[in-house]
Amino acid sequence: MHVSEFQQLIDTIYGAKDRERGTATTFMWLAEEVGELSRALRRQSREELEGEFADVFAWLSTLASIHGVDLEAVAAAKYGNGCPRCSATPCSCAEPKPSHTVAHGA
């Protein structure tokens, strides 16, 4: 399944509820799932990890759909030619200083 197919599937299953719920509440659900993923990473249970990764991906897909963003298209546009900053694969950018919070590839 391609990312766009997954995003469409999630939108078909949950889209009406997600749009009614709105951005703020949908984002809070995504944040909660990221927290559950964090816990699963600490526990290192493969089954739990797989479920939480799937949940985070589903909620991210939902949030993107609410805003009309095609995740597959934007990911390909930003990362399809390697690192967005240095264009290398693998990335050859200098690591950011630990005191800075930097988005991946930003």
Image: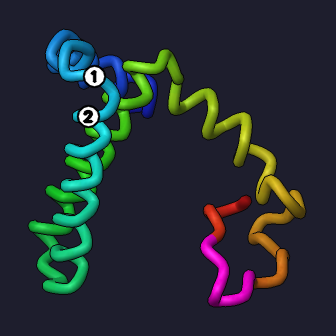
Front-lying residue, 49 or 17: 17
In terms of secondary structure, where does tag 1 sit? Answer: loop
Q: What range is drawn magenta here? A: 96-101
Q: Quadrant of residue 3?
A: top left
Q: Is residue 98 magenta?
A: yes
Specify the quadrant that holds the C terminus. bottom right
In terms of secondary structure, where does tag 2 sit? Answer: helix
Q: Residue furthest right?
A: 86
For residue 42, above or below residue 38:
below
Residue 11 falls left or right of residue 48 = right
For residue 106, above or below residue 61:
below
Name the residue rendered at 84%, 76% in the picture.
Answer: 92
Q: Main secondary structure of the magenta part?
A: loop
Where does residue 61 sit, x and y in percent of width and height? 36, 33
Where does residue 41 sit, x and y in percent of width and height? 24, 78
Residue 22's disc is: 1
Residue 80 falls left or right of residue 64 = right
User: Which residue lies under the disc numbered 2?
Assistant: 26
Specify the quadrant that holds the N terminus. top left
How is this picture coloured?
A: rainbow
